[in-house]
Image (cartoon, grey):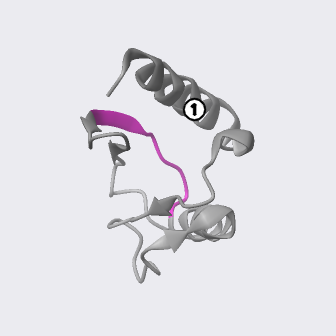
Amino acid sequence: MSEENVEIVREAHERFTKRGQPIWERIDADIEVFDHDIPDAQNPYRGVDGVTKWLSDFDEAWASYEMEVERLIDAGGTGRVAVSYPRDWSR
């Protein structure tokens, strides 16, 4: 993953952890989110509408959370981000 993309991910992570919102203008129309921590997740969540639904489902599943980027994965022009969340704070 290029250094520029790493900085974009860091900026997005920082904003999300502080405000609970992604950087909407940076979300690609073809984004796919896979969440393996939400019970009954509707994977994959696709596009901006999918991200909105994922955030709603995520909020419903957890009373509180912390988010930590585990690794950034270079996928040849596209990137992948592995994120971990504590699992012991479910509603």
Disc 1 element = helix
Give residue 52's position: percent from left, percent from top: 68, 64
Mark 1, residue position: 12
Is residue 68 on the magenta stretch? yes
Residue sitting nearer the eye, 88 or 17 = 17
The stretch in magenta equals 62-71
Is the residue 17 above or below the residue 49 in the image?
above
Give residue 30's position: percent from left, percent from top: 55, 61
Q: How many marks?
A: 1
Task: Name the quadrant containing residue 58.
Answer: bottom right
Identified by mark 1, the residue type is Ala
Q: Which residue is rendered at x = 61% and y = 69% of the image?
A: 50
Dominant secondary structure, magenta = loop
Task: Name the quadrant containing residue 21.
Answer: top right
Side of 79 where 15 appears, left or right: right
Q: Residue furthest front?
A: 77
Side of 8 where 90 appears, left or right: left
Give residue 65's position: percent from left, percent from top: 48, 47
Is the residue 39 above or below the residue 73 in the image?
below
Is residue 61 on the magenta stretch? no
Give residue 54's position: percent from left, percent from top: 57, 66
Residue sitting nearer the eye, 84 or 3 = 3
Task: Name the quadrant containing residue 90.
Answer: bottom left
Q: Which residue is rendered at x = 72% and y = 45% of the image?
A: 24
> How packed is label 1: few (under 14 Cα within 10 Å), some, or many (20 or more)?
some
Residue sitting nearer the eye, 16 or 39 = 16
Side of 65 where 14 appears, left or right: right
Q: Which residue is rendered at x = 56% and y = 26% of the image?
A: 14
